[in-house]
Amino acid sequence: MNQPIGTSRRGFFGQAVVGVAAAMMMGTAGEAQIVWKENQWKQPEFNTLLNLKRTVKLVIDCAVIEDGEVLGAARNALNAMHYGFGVAKNEIQVIAALHGPANLLNYDDYIWQKYKVGEWFKLDDPETGKPATRNIFYPSKASGTAGAGLHYTSQDENNPDSAEQDTSIEGLRARGVRFLSCHFATEAQARVILKRFNLKQEPEEIVSEMLAHTVPGALVVPGVVGSVTMLQSVGHYSYLKIA
């Protein structure tokens, strides 16, 4: 799988910042919802994570897609804390806080196909060898029919076919990892999408469409930077940055 080139990331941030700044300066009340207030998002759900009592709590801050590096880091953290340090599985909480390009890992196949995310970030689908038209980071190889759960063929934690070696979002969710989606990044990405496809829609139409297509379990927060700060200062989570 190819990694997204550096110019793609810089291009994204440059366009996004300009787009968001313009919306903040020019937008009317009906156009932009860049700043979310307390009653506009699932704050009680976040507060549950914030106040969670666990022996070990880790938030992984990631803004890059790369080759799903944040997912490997979450797997490694879970395995090391449980098997290496003997922390009980139910005493570990890992949160993956995704913003920037990595925020798109929180969106489903519909968004990836419609807005050509694989082509955008130079991500090939390993099954086709072509730019991904689906969220290649979400599904687990252990998933069966809808609602049937995950079924691993090995119970050996060192085996690639075990739950402990599954780096899919679906597999990590089954192990208790929570994924945060950045609303501010979604606003920025919607504006880049409008420019990339020369669309005439309002930015909030794209944002609403994206928010309707988050992957299961993704929690959209007003901004990942602020959320990570709250998790560290109030929730006493340890912090890991994936640059």
Image (cartoon, grey):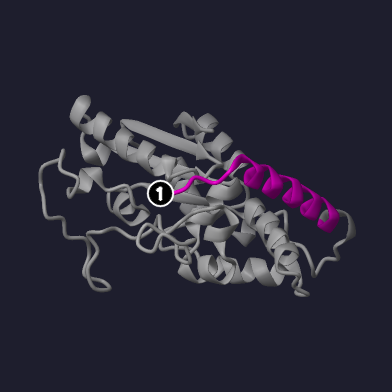
Residue 186, given in percent of the width and then of the height, sits at 63, 57
User: Is residue 86 at all visible to an observer of this figure?
Assistant: no
**Is-magenta flag for residue 210?**
no
Identified at 10% across, 47% down, the residue is 155
Dominant secondary-structure state across the stretch colored magenta? helix
Tag 1 secondary structure: strand
Per the image, the residue denoted by label 1 is 178
Residue 11, given in percent of the width and then of the height, sits at 70, 47
Residue 173 shown left or right of residue 101 in the figure: left
Quarter the C terminus occupies: top right
Residue 178, given in percent of the width and then of the height, sits at 40, 49
Identified at 46% across, 37% down, the residue is 60
Residue type at mark 1: give it. Arg
Question: Looking at this view, is 45 or 136 the one in front?
Answer: 136
Is 207 placed above or below 235 here?
Answer: below
Return the residue found at the far right: 26
Q: What is the span of residues highlighted in magenta in the rendered image?
A: 1-23
Is 221 placed above or below 89 here?
Answer: below
**Is-magenta flag for residue 21?**
yes
Identified at 24% across, 41% down, the residue is 90
Q: Residues within 10 Å of mark 1 (few under 14, many from 20)?
A: some
Residue 182 shown left or right of residue 198 in the figure: left
Question: Looking at this view, is 90 or 5 the one in front?
Answer: 5
Is 186 placed above or below 146 here?
Answer: above
Is 196 placed above or below 227 here?
Answer: below
